[in-house]
Image: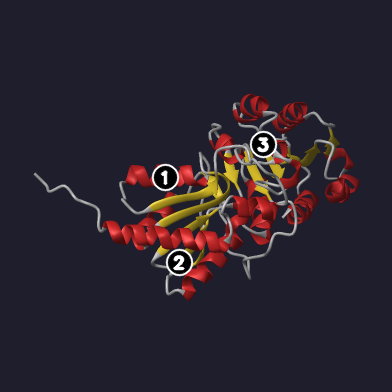
Amino acid sequence: MRTEFIEELTRLAERDDRICLVVGDLGFGVVVDFAKRFPDRFLNVGIAEQAMTGLAAGWALSGKVVFTYSIANFPTLRCLEQIRNDACYHGANVKIVAVGGGFAYGALGATHHATEDLAVLRAMPGMRVVAPGDTVEARLATRAVADLPGPCYLRIGRAGEPTVHDAEPEFRIGRAITVREGTDVAILSTGGMLKTAVDAAELLGADGISARVVSMHTLHPIDEGAILRASAETGAVLTLEEHSIVGGLGGAVAEVLAESASGVPFRRLGTPPRFAPRVGSQEFMLRQSGLTPPAVAEAARGLLLRHAALGPLMTVPEG
């Protein structure tokens, strides 16, 4: 996804001289073309993410559209105060780009595991939170984020993520994309888990279970309509994310379902809210968290079986 991001950003910068890029002493294999072509709009601030964010906010308030770029936790958690007070408080055109969400840098341990970022950034006033599901969405999300006024968070994969969409779908911030229709269960996915959701739906289909797959590429503002349609038109709802089950997509969907009193069977699939006791490759970390197509399919089956065993929800008679 990072390749699609930087290529699209470079194309946008050709047409819009407001677009700038600030990095925290990394990504040179990716950003070198942008830096050569637009030297007056590129800065490497070194390993100083707090300064990077404050500088980006000041640059943005002078009329620029400024993208900051770093690994996972570093442009988010390390400089959260600057994001809150400099970017969000002033509504600055700062676009925070985190490469390697979730366990993309799995072998480097908890300092490089981005499993709380969506929850934290979703709570920032005025912040839009976007996590595209594949390479196509990453390109479209970059374009949409650049056009949107105010602060945004764009969470992308490190590299090598599979392409799910055969053609460009309609992409709007705050509007989910239905990738696959289904009536028995809905899998709402965000970020790089989209291919896992599609593969799980294929496994369920082999068992005669019709699974809807929805790419929830925007966590804030969340697409309440897509959530409520899934709850009304299918028999159960699961959320799927490479992020803690606390406060990310699962938390956002739970809030909508609870306030709507839909009563649909619901389960959050993500990482447990603790530091990983073992580290390894991204694939290893996902297996440890039960975030594989067979595990997701089994969770969906279990949710449907539990609902069938419990029967319909009890209703309270009027009067």
Report x, y in % for residue 262. 31, 50
**Quarter of the image containing the C terminus?**
top left
Q: Tag 1, which secondary structure?
A: helix
Q: How many marks?
A: 3
Q: Residue at x 69, y 52 (%)?
A: 282
Q: Tag 3, which secondary structure?
A: loop
Q: Residues within 10 Å of mark 1 (few under 14, many from 20)?
A: some
Identify whether 51 is placed above or below 234: above
Q: Earlier in the sequence, mark 2 or mark 1?
A: 2
Contact? badges 1 and 3 (CB < 8 Å): no
Q: Residue at x 53, y 42 (%)?
A: 248
Residue at far front of view: 278
Residue closest to the eye, 3 or 71: 71
- Tell me the mark number nearer the camera, choosing from 1 and 3: 1
Q: CA distance from mark 2 to mark 3?
A: 39 Å
Report x, y in % for residue 187. 48, 59
Q: Residue at x 87, y 50 (%)?
A: 29
Identify whether 45 is placed above or below 241: above
Q: Amino acid at mark 3?
A: Asn
Residue 106: tell me if it is visible. yes
Q: Amino acid at mark 1?
A: Ala
Q: Which residue is identified by label 1?
A: 254
Q: Earlier in the sequence, mark 1 or mark 3?
A: 3
Q: Tag 2, which secondary structure?
A: strand
Mark drawn on residue 211:
2
Residue closest to the eye, 146 or 197: 197
The answer to which image quadrant residue 135 occupies is bottom right
Residue closest to the eye, 152 or 148: 152
Q: Which residue is identified by label 3?
A: 93
Residue closest to the eye, 312 or 164: 312
